[in-house]
Amino acid sequence: MKVLLHLEGAAVLAGAIWVYFGTLNAHSAPFVVLLLAPDLGMVGYLGGTRQGAACYNATHTYLLPAVLLAAGALLDIEVLAALAMVGAAHIGMDRMLGYGLKYPSAFRDTHLQRVGDAPPTSVEAEAAH
């Protein structure tokens, strides 16, 4: 099942790139600059793992790109659709690489896998229970 989730992320990444460049004919500079912008949600980890996971997850769900895409279509504002595609591309890229939504137990605990090969620390193991 994990392989399917990685492939699904790759498909979203490819589809978002195709729409961004092929359909919207948007410029490459904003795409490159904004592609990693959702990772700014990691700043929330300065407030602890629970707040960090909430902030990270808020910037790494398909909800915001879906809302931006719908607003762009309804209001006929292509820049909103382009931003939606950048967001979707970032999330798809993360999922393709195995980075998922974060659990509040630890940054490495995601809905796809535990990132990294180190075993959980005693604090992480205790928080998971």
Image: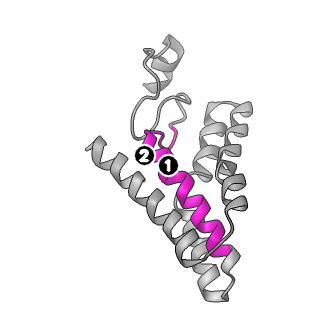
Would you place residue 66 above or below residue 112 in this image? below
Residue positioned most to the left: 1
Image quadrant holding the N terminus, namely: top left
- Label 2 to label 1: alpha-carbon separation: 5 Å
Q: Is residue 44 left or right of residue 70?
A: right
Viewer-proximal residue among 94 and 63: 94
Viewer-proximal residue among 52 and 20: 20
* Dot 1 amino acid type: Met
State which region is magenta. Answer: 80-102
Q: Could you tell me residue 25's position as x and y percent? A: 61, 75
Q: Report if the CB atoms under discs 2 and 1 are less than 8 Å apart.
A: yes
| Element type where label 2 sits in the image | helix
Q: Could you tell me residue 45's position as x and y percent? A: 68, 33
Q: Is residue 82 magenta?
A: yes
| Residue found 45% across the figure and 60% down from its top | 14
| Residue found 50% across the figure and 13% down from its top | 121
Q: Is residue 84 magenta?
A: yes
Q: Provide the residue designation for mark 1.
A: 93
Q: Provide the residue designation for mark 2.
A: 96
Quadrant position of residue 2: top left
Q: Could you tell me residue 47's position as x and y percent? A: 73, 33
Q: Is residue 123 left or right of residue 49?
A: left
| Element type where label 1 sits in the image | helix
* Dot 2 amino acid type: Met
> For mark 1, does the 10 Å Cα neighbourhood hold few (<14), some (14 to 19), or many (20 or more) residues?
many
Would you place residue 64 above or below residue 32 in this image? below
> For mark 2, does the 10 Å Cα neighbourhood hold few (<14), some (14 to 19), or many (20 or more) residues?
many
Image quadrant holding the C terminus, namely: top left
| Residue found 54% across the figure and 64% down from its top | 63
Say the numbered circle drawn on residue 127. none
